Image (cartoon, helix red, strand yellow):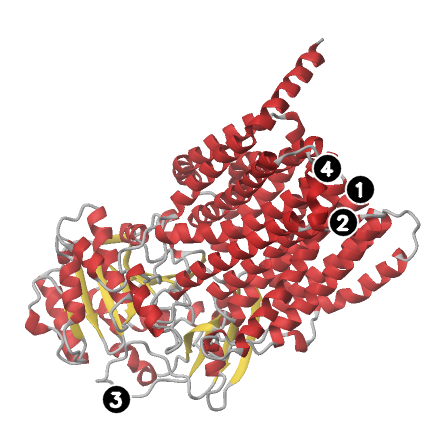
Amino acid sequence: MLPIYLGILLISAATLAFQITLTRIFSVAQWYHFAFMAVSIALLGFGASGSILSAFPGLIRGRISRRLSGIALLFSASILASYLTINYLPFDSFRIAWERRQLLYLAVYYLSLTLPFLLAGLSIGALLSLRPARASVIYAFNLAGSGLGCLAALGILLLVGGAGAVLFAAWLGLLATLAFRMQDGSGRGWVLHLIVLIALAPLVLHPPPALDVRMSPYKTLSTVLRYPDARLAFTGWNAFSRVDVVESSAIRSAPGLSFAYQGSIPPQAGLTVDGENLSPITRDGEAEEVAFLDHLPTALPYRLRFWARALIVQPRGGLDVLQALHHGAASVVVVEDNPLVVEVVRDRYGTFTGRLYHDPRVRIVLESGRSYARRTSERFDLVHLSLSDTFKVVNFGAYSLTEETRYTVEAFQDFYRRLADGGLLVVSRWLQIPPSESVRAGAVAVEALRGLGVTDPGSHIAAFRSFQTMTILIKRGPFTPAELQTIREFCRERQFDLVHLPGISPEEVNRYNVLDEPAYYRAFQQLLSPESDRFFAEYPYDVSPPTDDRPFFFHFFKWSQVPLILRLFGKTWQPFGGGGYLVLVALLILTALASAGLILLPLMIKGTKGTEGKGSRRLRWRVFGYFTLLGIGYLFIEIPLMQRFILFLGHPTYAFAAVLFAVLVFSGLGSLASPRFPLRWVLAILCVAILLYPPLLPPLFRLLLGLPLALRLLAAILILAPLGFLMGMPFPKGIALLSDRASGLIPWAWGVNGCASVLSSILSVMIAVAFGFSWVLVGAAVAYGVALGAIYPLAEQESLLLVGQFWDSLD
């Protein structure tokens, strides 16, 4: 059986590697919320596999190794076919409201995505059905393979990019085919199979150009490539992004530049991450070439703080670093979480930028800004959160589900603590109609100061706007009259409009870039008033301050918008803010309907009546409840834990890899050990452990935060190990109970669990967006607790049997 176990490990690794790669490819080719939607639907393939096995048990009759080998070969081919379909199909999600053929394309899209996961589920489900006594071992290899596939995907994306990672997953599927064939012992064909695998390996390392990821025409990179004389000068991948650089004489980017400036902007290249958020890489030349820097809103802090010690968070193309050096900063710490971005600006465009990142005053830290702010003891005169994303209309909604840990109440407090006395936290956001991002940033600033015990937040805040941006200055201490005078002069000279200053009068606002009414001034007045909660309740969008538990800065959707959405549906492009949330609602409804069909299908087919064995209708309901709750509970733990470990490990990718690897691998070990532990005890201890982790993690993180990254990664894995070990037991224990009482229900239980996993991935995000990640963990504890109630009668008999075996062993 070892070759078969190895085959299961390989096909599980290939499946998770393909799933992670799909998420990255969709984030590049489309947008984050679409990636989430497509992969969630695709995972229904696991639920479908259980339904097919339950409804048509004859599919797996015969020699199991040959069946699995054939499934693995089809799985490998389906990965490539699926990728080619989604890459070349002319599907346009923005035209779906009025172009009916897009619905057909969407159906083909999803069917092609589902097929690889269906075949992977068939291989694992078939083996569980035929060998239920070895469920703990099979499940252990499945989980271990998934954990290894996670690490493999991140590594291969770094080496060969998205297309190469797809080919790697298909190659792993072929390797699984070889492993299954070796179980036959005949040796026929496996040598040739091995030669083919070796011959195909170079394709993984050097994928053909025809497989390059095709990008939506609506993405920023696609738009910029249509500029005059535009050329793609660089493309590179790492584990969590694709970075491109475009060169064109038409690229000019200076966010918030004053209309009073009559000069030119020096040549720039455009840097994008995942095809979005164009950031300028600016040529540094003579003083007159960079004179435009004096007319940007972000020049003001350097008038207030000469020879500043500056911390600049995520400057991307480096414009804010050039700004700091141009204005005489004494030192500049650049915190950038993407090493590929730093490589591009520092090395590939080092000469172009005047060796910007080689200046002796500049120090580069590869880490998230939040993590660095928590780990360092340095103090700064300026902490600048760079405006590193491009303008988006609030109606767009494509980023509404994106977590943004720089713009939460706790984040502003972390950055504020890094300020020296009198230091400034500088935040710029885009202006939108109606006001949204800038108002929310103001709300975060006010709430952060209140949380730090500042009784008069308004005296610590200054805000002004250009034609397209708002800049907020948050001072560690009240603004002095001399500083307020400097701010007023700066704004008057550059025709920037004041939004808030301590003691500001209504006559001072809305003078240059005139709006119909001083909406931003009024919003800040209400944010600073005792009735701010009423303002949030009555505002047409959700602009309440995000927290680390609910870090969705770009989510502006309110349920009160729904009537307007329904009236405008099919008449306009995106008639609401935070559209990603409604995508989740639609996705939940679709997956619930599809899951119901897949779960009921075997029960409606006449040939499946015998699948219950000794069981009854009551047993079937218990099986349904138990395996549904396991599917929900498992992901309800994984997803919040990934979010919790981001700040500890310094980057979302590190948190994703550490949590997924630790939970899956130790779940595999738990599965191996599961026959020795009573299910009732396992579920009870697991519920308690889930509730203990949230209060225990913060003090542990504070204790270990000073360790190097490698040791923090190791610590994260060790912290997660006990929980992962417990999480791996309930599923194989449930299969073992069924093997004794109703083995015909095992493939159905596998399908139920797969469908529940898809629903839980959607539900967990919906709960996190609406209430916070803490409630998702509470939901996990409830799911496992109710699962214990569902399976209790069967588990009670198992406990008595294990106790008897224990006493017998003592005789």
Name the kind of residue labelled 4 in the image: Pro
Cβ–Cβ under 8 Å for marks 4 and 1: no
Q: Which tag, 4 or 2, sits closer to the chain's start?
A: 2
Task: Report the residue marked by disc 3.
Answer: 262
**What's the residue at 55%, 78% (across, down)?**
101
**Furthest residue toward bottom:** 228
Q: Which tag, 2 or 1, sits closer to the chain's start?
A: 1
Q: Is residue 133 above or below residue 195?
A: above
User: In this view of the protein, which residue sits in the foreground, 156 or 214?
Assistant: 214
Q: Which tag, 3 or 2, sits closer to the chain's start?
A: 2
Cβ–Cβ under 8 Å for marks 3 and 1: no
- Distance from disc 2 to disc 1, alpha carbons, whole Å, reads 9 Å
**Picture disc at residue 2:** 1
Task: Report the residue marked by disc 2.
Answer: 7
Assign a secondary structure to mark 1: helix
**What's the residue at 25%, 53% (across, down)?**
420
Name the kind of residue labelled 1 in the image: Leu
**Furthest residue toward front:** 606
In percent of width and height, residue 621 lies at 57, 38
- Distance from disc 4 to disc 2, alpha carbons, whole Å, reads 17 Å
- Distance from disc 3 to disc 2, alpha carbons, whole Å, reads 67 Å
Name the kind of residue labelled 2 in the image: Gly
Task: Report the residue marked by disc 4.
Answer: 132
Q: Which tag, 3 or 1, sits closer to the chain's start?
A: 1
Marks 4, 3: nearer the viewer: 4
